[in-house]
Amino acid sequence: MTGVCGCCGALRPRYKRLVDNIFPEDPEDGLVKANMEKLTFYALSAPEKLDRIGAYLSERLSRDVARHRYGYVCIAMEALDQLLMACHCQSINLFVESFLKMVRKLLESDKPSLQILGTNSFVKFANIEEDTPSYHRSYDFFVSRFSEMCHSSYEDPDIRTKIRMAGIKGLQGVVRKTVNDELQANIWDPQHMDKIVPSLLFNLQSGERTESRSPSPLQASEKEKESPVELTERCFRELLGRAAYGNIKNAITPVLMHLDNHSLWEGKTFAVRCFKIIMYSIQSQHSHLVIQQLLGHLDANSKNSATVRAGIVEVLLEAAAIAASGSVGELYVHTHIHTYIHKTALADIFHFGVNWCFDYSLFVYAGPTVLEVFNTLLRQLRLSVDYELTGSYDGSTNIGTKIIKAHEERQLQEAVIRTIGSFANTLPTYQRSEVMLFIMGKIPVPGVHLALPSTGSGHEGTRMIQVMLLKSLVQVTAGFQTTNMLTALPSSFLEPLLSFSLTEDPEVRLLVLQILLSLIDRHDNRPKFTNISIISDISVLKLKVDKCSRQDNLFMKKHGQQLYRHIYLGCKEHSSGRQHYETLFALLGLLSVELANEEVVVDLIRLALALQDLALSTDEALPIFNRCAVHALAAAYLNLICQLTTVPAFCQHIHEVIEVRQKESPYLLPEDVFIDNPKLPSSLEKVEGDVLFLQSKITEVLGGSGYNTDRLATPYVPQYTDEDRLSKRKSIGETISLQVEVESRNSPEKEERTPAEEITFETLKNAIVDSVGMEEQERERRRQVVEKFQKAPFEEIAAHCGARATLLQSKLNQIFEITIRPPPSPSGTISSGYGQTQSRSVPIYEMKFPDLCVY
């Protein structure tokens, strides 16, 4: 009976007859549309037959593929596509299984046309939103096959391009079909991402090589949609745009591995392009995860070549520029939650780098802490210096060790410094201040910090680290704007910074001055003081001068003398060059414009006159250039400050001296000193008379305008402190003798003094030892007190405080007993036996006062 049914068409199932009728006798005629409509209507009317229709079509397609009847294969796939588009019933899942089986059969074929046909059908299926979920469907084969097609090496370049584009479209379809369906296989698993992402990057990279052979402008618009590079980039962006918080790592890790395996960090261009696509495609709140992975990858490649590390750093630089400032360690506090958080608690959060992600809590924080980012970059900077000095990555120079190139390490160091500046530019003022303090704490101080982990670096390693970290500070402080200098520049930052201006290294001193300029300049006046010159009318500079605020006055009252002292000592350095003096002039000018009140102006004038005395003195043995440079610096600054004060007599005196110098001693003016070939005399023995600025004359003319004449008449002498030990040029004996000299100069002559104690070497030695001993005792006492309150039990602390309270109460009672004996009171007096009146001791609460005195 079965054989009879097979031969007799009338007895065959209806769905088979409907399927057979859609196939014409000649496959070139294409699908029979009328019969296709009947089949579609039947499938919609009897959805329970849909799975059988799919199975039968699959059977016919497999037979046609085996017999190489590709025309019928195309008709079968077209019929399947139309049925998929029309049917959305609950039985679609069984039909889809047959459909995917047929697509798989086509993709396994060796013919490119069938592979492309199967891919196109799969893409159409991927765009269909199914009404019912599927619990058992797997796309592992399609991910592997489409990834393989993306790497096609077919001989014909046109066919190869079509196959690769089909593979890209197929991957795009897989992502669309699975990414939003939690019941499907997780496409974000590493096993899938390790195939999808490298396939996309391979085509993105291949497209870069053929960009130079781009079509003409007329053809470009037609072929743009068919470009593999455009298609790949669009697919890559779509993939990243769909990535949730927990999937970013799995999507980025294959990118890093691909760039490692194909040595693409060294070229930088492709790596930068990839991460630009990534940073612009992912959700902005996830940017910090990419940066965190890049930082971790940089650490993992610490012993790789400098070009690889430089490539990663360049990518970090671009990523930091794109990432929103709130993504890298920002801490937001909801203003609608009225909760007080102590400052130390915030400091602990930043210190430990805890990632906070509470949707409705006080903190909204995610990503690496600010200090974690900078700590990683500074560590790389330190390692690079170590590698440059030792010449190898393992600190040895054995045979077989990979020898590094110094110039490559220098390029890496510059890239790290630029990246530090890029990250700093995204931070608000308060966080930038924290970063400045953090970097300052990393700078090694001679005799205090160890040089470098390796033994071969020594003093040169310490110096290079100082230079690199100070260059980083220059980048961080660039564009720094603050309204309160006291809070933005605390003593814990300013004092260590100024201490480095006393070192013998001219490069370190110049970097310190540049940092100070960036910190003080708040109105972009710095470019106007680039060159030292005598300007007859400073209005052409268009300086922005604001009234000095109360915070600025407090800042200068606290730190002004430190700044003057370091400017003075900077001019004394024998190794100072043209750049140093130009920067010192800019610093003086910015102090006058940004932070000057009347008292500061007086001190700056005294400092300029002290610089003139320094240039006249032969005790310091300054070279001729330095002495002429100091003279020129003082003249240029006095010319500036006299016009800022707008005192006519002061301006007249300064201009008269400058005119005399122009005629008789042009080498004392900046125009002849700060040039490529300075015009210097052989000696400076006859600098006197009208070519000098007179302190008495300046005091007289400014006194008439209300300035403090007593302070103006007092010569400026810098006060030497313990910081001078860093310069290793001043002994403690010299420091104390100078302080004694300062006191003798500043004290009035008519004041009677006690006979001075004879100061000997033993006296000085004992004074130093005693002071050090007392400081150590005080520190030890404080440490014991802190330790007691940290470790002692509560009962012991309470008893101790109670005992102190009892002692205080007893002392107060004694005081009250003394004070309750008032003068004669309204209660009257008593007579003593000797005829004298004696006040009666009456407690204050027993006294009787008049009604007017009682409230």
Image (cartoon, rainbow, N blue to C red):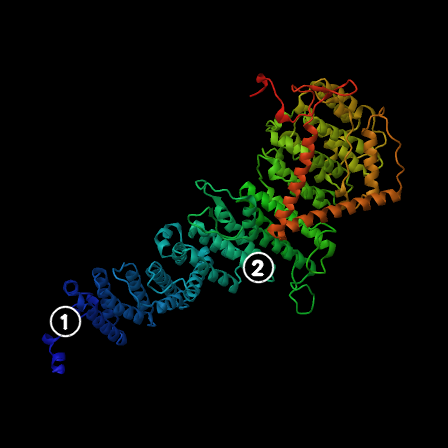
Q: Which residue is mark 1?
A: 17
Q: Quadrant of residue 166?
A: bottom left
Mark 1 nearby-residue class (10 Å; few <14, some 14–19, many ≥20) = some
Q: Nearer the viewer, mark 1 or mark 2?
A: 2
Mark 2 residue element = helix
- Residue 832 x/y as whole percent: 76, 21
Q: Which image quarter is the C terminus in?
A: top right
Answer above or below: position of 586 versus 447: above
* Numbered label tally: 2
Mark 1 residue element = helix
- Residue in the picture at 56% in, 61% down: 300
- Residue 214 x/y as whole percent: 42, 55
Q: Which of the pair 306/838 is nearer the observer?
A: 838
Q: Which residue is mark 2?
A: 299
- Residue 5 x/y as whole percent: 12, 79
Residue type at mark 1 is Arg
Tell me which numbered mark, 1 or 2, is placed earlier along the sequence.
1
